[in-house]
Image (cartoon, rainbow, N blue to C red):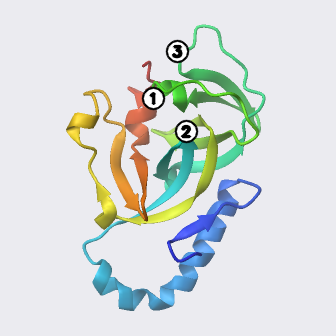
Amino acid sequence: MTENNEIMLPASGLAEDILARFMDDAQRETDGMHQDAEKKEGETIHHLVTFNLGKEEYGVDIGSVQEIIRASDITPVPGAPGHVRGVINLRGKIIPVVDLRKRFALQDAKESDGQRIIVVEVGGKRLGMLVDSVSQVLKVSSSVVEDMPEEATSVDDDFIKGIGKLDGRLVIMLDLNNSLLSAGKPQIR
């Protein structure tokens, strides 16, 4: 682990590989944890998988992430909401893929080799999130997280849990329940 609590993603992108690496690092830190516990009392540590949409960096709770795969073989579905790119067959399971650029009303981007699908479990359902690239796994203390200013969002933008301020950069922390689901179905935006 690096000094700013970053973990580089393994090449496979599988959730178990990411979590195994994360858990190994966490186990090594356990020895010094008792000394740090007094400093961290009252703080929450958020464990985030971070990804990019354009120049912006976003993060989702690592506990929701099932795996990360290359963005390929997405089958369009006629009549699907505009932000649903289509479906994929993931080891025999049909998974809907939400294009987060469209979901967040961002400008379309050209397809690239860096695009990934982050498979998450939300509300008991598995969904894929199409993103421009996946960055890293971060540990973010609640002491550096602030609420999104009301003036910067509209009423229906309640999918942002907060903004993490890290070494001169901002990470927008997403609430997957609000950003991807509404009454158990992908939201139409």
Residue sitting nearer the eye, 109 or 74: 109
- The residues bearing labels 1 and 3 have C-alpha atoms spaced at a distance of 13 Å
- Identify the secondary structure beneath mark 3: loop
- Are the two marked residues, 1 and 3, in contact with CB atoms closer than 8 angstroms? no
| Amino acid type, callout 1 | Phe
Q: In this picture, is 90 found above or below 136?
A: above
Q: Please report whichever mark, 1 or 3, sits nearer to the chain's N-terminal start.
A: 3
- The residues bearing labels 2 and 3 have C-alpha atoms spaced at a distance of 20 Å
Q: What residue does disc 1 label? A: 104
Please indicate whether residue 42 sits to the left or right of residue 44 in the image: left
Q: Please report whichever mark, 1 or 2, sits nearer to the chain's N-terminal start.
A: 2
Q: What residue does disc 3 label? A: 81
Residue 125 point in image, percent of width and height: 53, 36
Residue 78 point in image, percent of width and height: 64, 8
Residue sitting nearer the eye, 51 or 188: 51
Please indicate whether residue 154 sits to the left or right of residue 171 in the image: left
Residue visible at 65% across and 69% down? 21
Q: In this picture, is 171 found above or below 43?
A: above
Tag 2: Cα neighbours inside 10 Å, few (<14), some, or many (≥20)?
many
Residue 25 point in image, percent of width and height: 59, 77
